[in-house]
């Protein structure tokens, strides 16, 4: 029975000199380090393709940073980028603000901290995972259609939706400490699925780990 692997790729470092929670805000571009990360991922995928990997489908969130992360891989593998709204960043009440303790302690925000398990300040973890998993299933079907057994697809997304999806795939509780997410910039969370769409393996890797020291990373971005 044919299997497929869908790689959830987090975007590269973003140029964000003001240090805001940019969330779904438009026109947040990759930094120079972020562009180098994207090129390194393209080299990684190209090397795997040269070794026989059947990477046949490339998808990205509509946000600028995800599209820019996908571009070098599209060029390296001669793939078109399919834009997928279901893998966009999570909604967040604090979008556009500076993530400081003094900001969070303002009385106008207190209502949004009423249920951190859901979380009440943004899109529920469960809903994030559900929409990403639906996109993963469509990518699995498309990959097998294009490449047959063992085909692979890449979905360029964002930290929190990827992490929520991984927690769901591994049967873990969704509430978590954002500081403990294993989902660094341009990391890969790779889901291998069987012909019924069941996730049979979850793997994590950091092909651009050499560029991570010193990189800026806003939690949830």
Image (cartoon, helix red, strand yellow):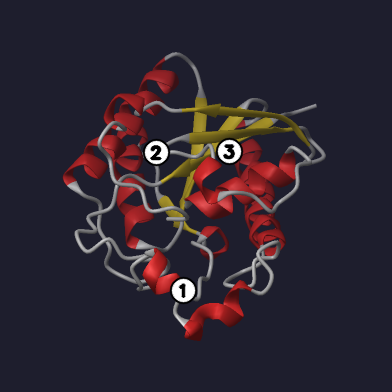
Q: How far across and down, in percent of the image, does residue 103 sit?
A: 39, 73
Q: How far across and down, in percent of the image, does residue 150 sit?
A: 64, 25
Query: Which SS class for mark 3?
Result: helix
Q: Is residue 106 above or below residue 65?
A: below
> Of discs 2 and 3, which sits in the foreground?
2
Crowding at mark 1 (Cα within 10 Å: few <14, some 14-19, many 20+) = few
Q: CA distance from mark 3 to mark 1?
A: 51 Å
Which badge, 3 or 1, comes first in the chain's sequence?
A: 1
Q: Which mark is residue 146?
A: 3
Crowding at mark 2 (Cα within 10 Å: few <14, some 14-19, many 20+) = many
The residue lying at 69 percent from left, 70 percent from top is: 115
- Residue for badge 2: 186
The image quadrant where one finds the N terminus is: top right
The residue lying at 64 percent from left, 60 percent from top is: 128
Q: How many marks?
A: 3
The residue lying at 50 percent from left, 45 percent from top is: 179
Q: How far across and down, in percent of the image, does residue 126 sit?
A: 72, 60
Which badge, 2 or 3, comes first in the chain's sequence?
A: 3
Residue 153 falls left or right of residue 138: left
Instruction: Tell me whether circle 1 and circle 2 mark residues in contact (CB < 8 Å).
Output: no
The image quadrant where one finds the C terminus is: bottom left
Q: Is residue 44 in sight in this rendering?
A: yes
> Of discs 1 and 2, which sits in the foreground?
1
Instruction: Tell me whether circle 3 and circle 1 mark residues in contact (CB < 8 Å).
Output: no
Q: Which mark is residue 105?
A: 1
Which badge, 1 or 2, comes first in the chain's sequence?
A: 1
Q: Is residue 154 in sight in this rendering?
A: no
């Amino acid at each position: 029975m044919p299997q497929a692997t869908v790689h959830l790729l987090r975007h590269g470092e973003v140029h964000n000199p003001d240090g805001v929670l940019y969330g779904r805000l438009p026109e947040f571009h990759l930094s120079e380090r972020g562009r180098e990360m994207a090129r390194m991922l393209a080299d990684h995928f190209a090397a795997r393709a040269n070794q026989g990997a059947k990477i046949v489908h490339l998808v990205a969130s509509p946000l600028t940073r995800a599209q820019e992360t996908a571009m070098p891989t599209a060029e390296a593998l001669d793939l078109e980028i399919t834009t997928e709204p279901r893998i966009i960043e999570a909604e967040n009440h604090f979008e556009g603000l500076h993530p400081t303790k003094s900001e969070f302690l303002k009385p106008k925000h207190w209502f949004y901290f009423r249920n951190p398990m859901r979380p009440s300040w943004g899109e529920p973890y469960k809903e994030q995972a559900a929409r990403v998993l639906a996109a993963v299933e469509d990518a699995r079907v498309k990959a097998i259609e294009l490449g047959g057994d063992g085909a692979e697809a890449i979905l360029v997304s964002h930290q929190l939706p990827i992490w929520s999806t991984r927690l769901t795939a591994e049967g873990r509780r969704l509430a978590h400490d954002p500081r403990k997410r294993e989902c660094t910039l341009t990391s890969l969370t790779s889901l291998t699925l069987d012909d019924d769409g069941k996730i049979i393996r979850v793997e994590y890797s950091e092909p651009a780990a050499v560029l991570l020291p010193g990189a800026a990373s806003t939690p949830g971005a």
